[in-house]
Image (spheres, rainbow, N blue to C red):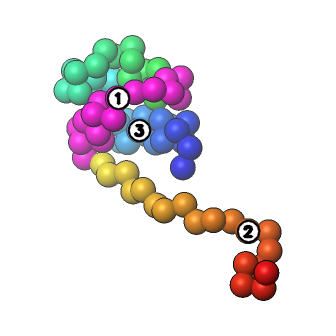
């Protein structure tokens, strides 16, 4: 999942939980403007701690999957 898609999902979850940007930002310790930019995918760099706090406030987990290599050919036949 790319950062922009994660940002959109954070916004969707926040709204579903009926939380304002101000409420979430205050709990996380960032400005509302920073959260607004993050939800638009405009901030490419946000601290991992702030990101984890946002997910915690939203009671949400991010699953990280191992990236599988993609081959254009069958590696067993080479």
Q: Residue 71 carries which label?
A: 2
Tag 1 near tag 3, CB within 8 Å: no
Horizontal side, residue 58 vs residue 66: left or right: left
Q: Is mark 3 on a helix, strand or loop?
A: helix
Residue found at x 34% / y 16%: 32
Q: Is mark 1 on a helix, strand or loop?
A: loop
76 magenta-colored: no
Mark 2 or 1: in front is 2
- Residue under pointer 1: 47
Residue found at x 52% / y 38%: 3
- Residue under pointer 3: 10
47 magenta-colored: yes
Which residues lie in the magenta part? 41-59
Q: Is mark 2 on a helix, strand or loop?
A: loop
Q: How far apart are marks 1 and 3 (CA)?
A: 15 Å
Q: Which one is nearer the viewer's eye here, 19 or 74? A: 74
Crowdedness of circle 1 by 10 Å Cα count: few (<14), some, many (20+)?
A: few
Of callouts 2 and 1, the N-terminal one: 1
Crowdedness of circle 2 by 10 Å Cα count: few (<14), some, many (20+)?
A: few
Of callouts 1 and 3, the N-terminal one: 3
Give the x, y percent position of residue 78: 79, 81
Crowdedness of circle 3 by 10 Å Cα count: few (<14), some, many (20+)?
A: many
Of callouts 3 and 2, the N-terminal one: 3
Residue found at x 46% / y 61%: 65
């Amino acid at each position: 999942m790319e950062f922009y898609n994660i940002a959109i999902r954070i916004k969707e979850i926040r709204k579903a939980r009926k939380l304002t940007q101000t409420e979430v930002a205050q709990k996380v310790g960032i400005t509302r403007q920073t959260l607004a930019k993050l939800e638009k995918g405009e901030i490419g760099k946000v601290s991992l701690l702030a990101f984890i706090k946002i997910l915690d406030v939203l009671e949400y987990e991010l699953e990280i999957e191992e990236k599988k290599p993609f081959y254009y050919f069958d590696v067993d036949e080479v």
